[in-house]
C-alpha cells in the first residue's frame, strides 16, 4: 500500500523553513536549523523522527543538530562529511532511503552557495536548501558562477510538477528583483499578486512548482533573450553565454 506522505514547511528563525516529510507516524526533517519548533511539531503530532538531512553547513540550517542528538543520541544525520554533526556522510549520486516512509531521495551535488551544498530529490519534491530559491537563487559564498549555474541546470531538467522546497521565505523580495529583469513577464506579474496575498495571510509561498520557477525565476532563464538583454544592460556590455548572464544577474541581485 502506498504511504501518504505529508510534506510541510515548519517556520524557524526570521525566514527559514525546516521541511518535514511524515506519514502520521514517522518523519524525516531537512535542515534542522532550530530544534525547538521541530521538536514541538513532532511532539504535538506524535511523530518519531527517523533522520535529519542537511543541505549545507550554514548555522541557520544545522544549529539544531546538537540539540536533536542530545534528545535522540542514535539519530542519523545525513549530509556533507565536512559538517561535524553529520554521522551519515553522503554525496552526489547517493540515494537515501527510508523504508517506513517508502521514501527514496536522490542526492545531488549542487555547489555554488557553498562548495559542498547538497540537494535531495524525491517524493516529487526538491529539497534544495539555499541553492535555488523561489524566484531567485542563493548567494555565491564559496562557489563560482559556472558551478552555481551548473547546479541550477540539474534542477531545470527535472519534471515540471516537482515541488521546490527551499529553505527560506524570500519569494516576494526575489519577485521584486525578477520584475526589474523581466517587467513584461505576465506570469511573473500574476505570481506577485498571488504570493503577496499569501504573505498577507502569513502563509508560506512554498512550495512552488518547478514549472512556475522555469517561467518566472530569472536565474533559471539565463538563455532567455529578454533576460540576457536585461543582464547585458546592467553589465554595460554584451554577455556571450548563459553563465555570463547568470553571473551578471547574481551581481545585480547583490546590489539590489
Ligand atoms: Zn546558507
Ligand atoms: Fe540559509
Image (cartoon, helix red, strand yellow):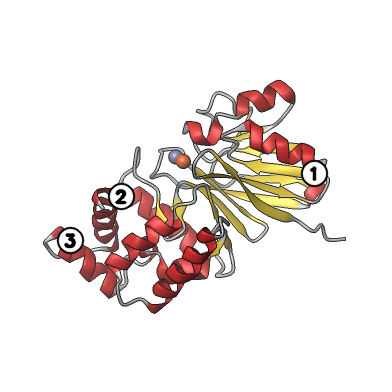
Q: Label 1: which residue? A: 45
Q: Label 3: which residue? A: 234
The spot of residue 56 in percent (x, y) is 50, 37
Q: On the rendered structure, is 78 left or right of 108?
A: right
Q: Quadrant of residue 244?
A: bottom left
Q: Earlier in the sequence, mark 3 or mark 2?
A: 2
Q: Label 2: which residue? A: 145
Under circle 1, the secondary element is helix
**Of the pair 108 and 210, the residue shown nearer to us:** 210
Which residue lies at the image location 88% right of the left edge and 60% below the top edge? 1
The spot of residue 90 in percent (x, y) is 59, 37
Under circle 3, the secondary element is helix
Marks 2 and 1: in contact by CB < 8 Å? no
Marks 2 and 3: in contact by CB < 8 Å? no
Q: Earlier in the sequence, mark 1 or mark 2?
A: 1
Can you tell which of label 3 and label 1 is closer to the viewer? Answer: 1
Which residue lies at the image location 58% right of the left edge and 64% below the top edge? 162
CA distance separating discs 3 and 2: 17 Å
Which residue lies at the image location 56% right of the left edge and 55% below the top edge? 202
Amino acid at each position: 500500500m502506498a504511504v501518504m506522505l505529508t510534506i510541510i514547511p515548519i517556520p524557524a528563525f526570521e525566514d527559514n523553513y525546516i521541511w518535514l516529510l511524515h506519514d502520521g507516524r514517522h518523519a524525516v526533517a531537512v535542515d534542522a536549523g532550530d530544534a525547538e519548533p521541530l521538536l514541538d511539531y513532532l511532539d504535538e503530532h506524535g511523530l518519531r523522527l527517523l533522520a535529519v538531512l542537511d543541505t549545507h553547513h550554514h548555522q541557520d540550517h544545522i544549529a539544531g543538530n546538537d540539540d536533536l542528538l542530545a534528545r535522540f543520541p542514535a539519530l542519523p544525520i545525513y549530509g556533507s562529511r565536512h559538517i561535524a554533526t553529520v554521522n551519515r556522510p553522503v554525496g552526489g549520486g547517493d540515494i537515501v532511503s527510508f523504508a517506513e516512509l517508502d521514501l527514496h531521495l536522490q542526492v545531488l551535488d549542487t555547489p555554488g552557495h557553498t562548495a559542498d551544498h547538497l540537494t535531495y530529490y524525491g517524493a516529487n519534491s526538491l529539497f534544495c536548501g539555499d541553492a535555488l530559491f523561489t524566484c531567485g537563487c542563493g548567494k555565491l559564498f564559496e562557489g563560482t558562477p559556472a558551478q552555481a549555474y551548473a547546479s541550477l541546470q540539474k534542477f531545470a531538467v527535472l519534471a515540471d510538477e516537482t515541488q521546490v522546497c527551499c529553505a527560506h521565505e524570500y519569494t516576494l523580495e526575489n519577485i521584486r528583483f525578477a520584475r526589474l529583469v523581466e517587467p513584461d513577464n505576465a506570469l511573473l506579474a500574476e505570481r506577485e499578486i498571488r504570493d503577496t496575498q499569501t504573505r498577507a495571510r502569513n502563509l508560506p509561498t512554498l512550495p512552488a512548482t518547478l514549472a512556475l520557477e522555469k517561467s518566472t525565476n530569472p536565474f533559471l532563464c539565463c538563455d532567455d533573450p529578454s533576460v540576457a538583454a536585461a543582464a547585458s544592460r546592467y553589465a554595460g556590455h554584451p554577455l556571450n553565454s548563459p553563465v555570463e548572464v547568470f553571473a551578471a544577474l547574481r551581481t545585480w541581485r547583490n546590489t539590489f
